[in-house]
Image: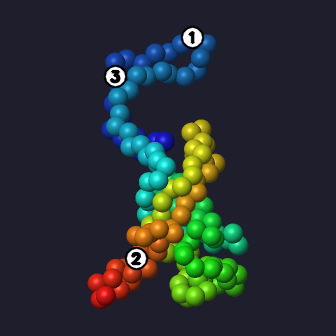
Amino acid sequence: MTVLINNVEAVGPGRIVHGDGAVYQTVRFDQLVFRPKDNEVVEGVVVEIVKFGAFIRFGPLDGLLHISQVMDDRVDYDLDNQRLIGKDTGRALSVGDVVRARIVSMELNEKNPQDSKIGLTMRQPGLGKLEWIAEDNTKKGEA
């Protein structure tokens, strides 16, 4: 999926086709492309918290982090504060938090990328809210 087109240069003269109001021009350009892959680890921002999980924006796409995939803890939805909270750990996930997640399922819609369906998980070592990862690394260093 194309994220950016830059340095567009015309190559040769353009063409005008009789009866068609458009001008056709061959061009050369640089293109930045993003194509996520299964099991790829991505960093993104929580953009929405819902009853069944959270939506994470990474690059031009949003992925669904199901409530069962947030952490190795039972997770509750806090409607008033728009957060997902771990019952035992007390860890909370809110809009604006930066997270690291793994892509576990993917159906890309090339024509309309916003309609793509991407499933994420954070239930593996090294994944989760970046603050949680830093805390876990500090605890491992102390042990």
Which residue carries the number 3 mark? 11
Q: Secondary structure at mark 2?
A: helix
Residue 109 placement (x, y as % from top left): 60, 42
> In the structure shown, which secondary structural element does the residue marked by tag 1 occupy?
loop
Identify the image quadrant of residue 112. Answer: top right
Quarter the C terminus occupies: bottom left
Residue depicted at 53% across the width and 87% down the height: 89
Q: Give the residue drawn at x 62%, y 51%.
A: 117
Q: Amino acid at mark 1?
A: His
Mark yes or no: residue 97 visible: yes
Q: Amino acid at mark 2?
A: Ile
Question: Which of the pair 143/119 is nearer the observer?
Answer: 143
Q: Which residue is mark 2?
A: 133
In the picture, measured across the screen, residue 37 lies left or right of residue 90, that is left
Q: Residues within 10 Å of mark 3 (few under 14, many from 20)?
A: few
**Which residue shows up at 29% across the image and 84% down it?**
141
- Mark 1 closeness class: few <14, some 14–19, many ≥20 residues within 10 Å: few
- Percent x, y for residue 27? 38, 26
Q: Is residue 32 above or below residue 133?
A: above
- Judging depth in this view, the residue of 101 and 17 nearest the camera is 101
Which mark is first along the chain, 2 or 1? 1
Q: Is residue 136 above or below residue 67?
A: below
Q: Secondary structure at mark 3?
A: loop
